[in-house]
Amino acid sequence: MAKQFYGISALTQGNNTPSTQVPDENIIPSVRVKDIILDDTHEEFEEYGGWNGIGTIFYEDVRTPGREENSKNIAIPLYSNSKLYPLINEIVPLIFLYSWDAQSNTSIRQAYYLPSINVWNSQHHNALPPPELQSEKKSTRDYENSIGGSERDVRRVYDDSTDINLGEGFNEQINTHPLLVFAGDNLIEGRWGNSIRFGSSIQDNINYPITKIRNGQPSNIPQEGWVPIKEDINNDKSSIYLTENQKLDIEVASKIYKSYNEAPIAPKEYQENQIILNSGRLLLNAKSSDILLASNKSINLNSVNSVNIDTKDFNIQGTTRIGGPNVEQPLLRGDVMVDELNSLIDNLISFFNAYGGEAPNAKIVSTPLAKTSIIPSLNLIKANLELTKSKIGFIS
């Protein structure tokens, strides 16, 4: 196995760095990751190019672990725009290609690494510990022989313990399930139960596309962590589904549609193009402009407890019905009503003030009673009429 002394370190070490011994071009060596530079807290961050050295790994030969502990075998990521850095003790393949100074020295090769090798067929991690640790773990059932007499080992962790060093900040979760794959699917899976599925469903022998974005699997899954599962829109932590001609068995928080004469199609029954967002909480925030909701039919706000609106101005254009779709009693227009009541009260006061003596008709209240009781009451009502008008609610 060739040792790699060259690469990003040349940025600080100059031309005295020894040239790299490149293996045969037909050989793609596999190496175990011993360390990786992920941020500026790494002790060798500056030595290997600062921020330009992010993703640099230190590795050892899988066949001879620990043989040359003092050597600095390094490799950098092959891809610049897709960052899938390996964990410590994962195995990566190396290829040797031209480095940054290829124009001045074409004999120098830089070691680049590809994504980690899928030794355990696990999206969570594929770390292969040193032989001595692997032997110990076999005795505690972390590793077993495959069913059917295969010589290939499979990793089966039955408890919460693991002695594999995966790097600072990465704690193995033994119940992180892979996703079940269907014919034609294209899956992208993170290490923690987050995924994107570009899949399809069949209707009348036609495959219709569906895209599922999922973040977090259900909390309580009875199967062991290596058993594949499917997305569960009701129990996954957060989901976005983009559909075409699919029904989704989604349980919505509230399904009261009494405000409609004809309720919309129930969420479980809808089978057209739609986008579904489902999580514990949804937040839509427009930092500099508007949130625009447009619909060809209706916009339904459906809540178990309340719909609250806090704003400076609340404007509604069009017919507003409070209490149901068939209510017929109109709201009173505040200014018009107050003006009419003022006019009525003024006329009544003038009427009672017009009598200086006995009332001309026994059925009419006498003038003294009008002056001591009725007229003051009418004046009080008149004074308070403006208070009956809302300060925040207005109608046309």
Image (tube, rainbow, N blue to C red):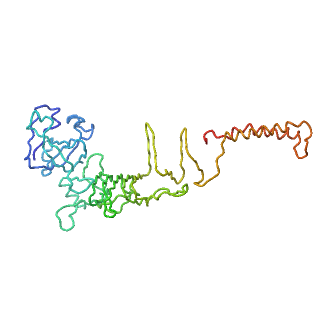
- The residue lying at 88 percent from left, 47 percent from top is 363
Query: Could you say where residue 172 lies in the image, as x and y percent from the top left?
Result: 29, 53
Query: Could you say where residue 327 lies in the image, as x and y percent from the top left?
Result: 61, 53
Query: Could you say where residue 279 lies in the image, as x and y percent from the top left?
Result: 42, 52
Relative to 133, 234 lies left or right:
right
Relative to 207, 12 lies left or right:
left
- For the image shown, how many numbered marks are present on the structure? 0
Whether 161 is drawn above or below 57: the answer is: below
Relative to 301, 151 lies left or right:
left
Residue farthest along the right direction in this orientation: 358
- The residue lying at 38 percent from left, 52 percent from top is 240
Taking depth in this image into account, of 151 and 81 the one nearest to the observer is 81
Residue 379, picture quadrant: top right
- The residue lying at 28 percent from left, 57 percent from top is 185
Taking depth in this image into account, of 341 and 210 the one nearest to the observer is 341
- The residue lying at 29 percent from left, 48 percent from top is 170
On-image quarter of the C terminus: top right
Taking depth in this image into account, of 270 and 70 the one nearest to the observer is 270
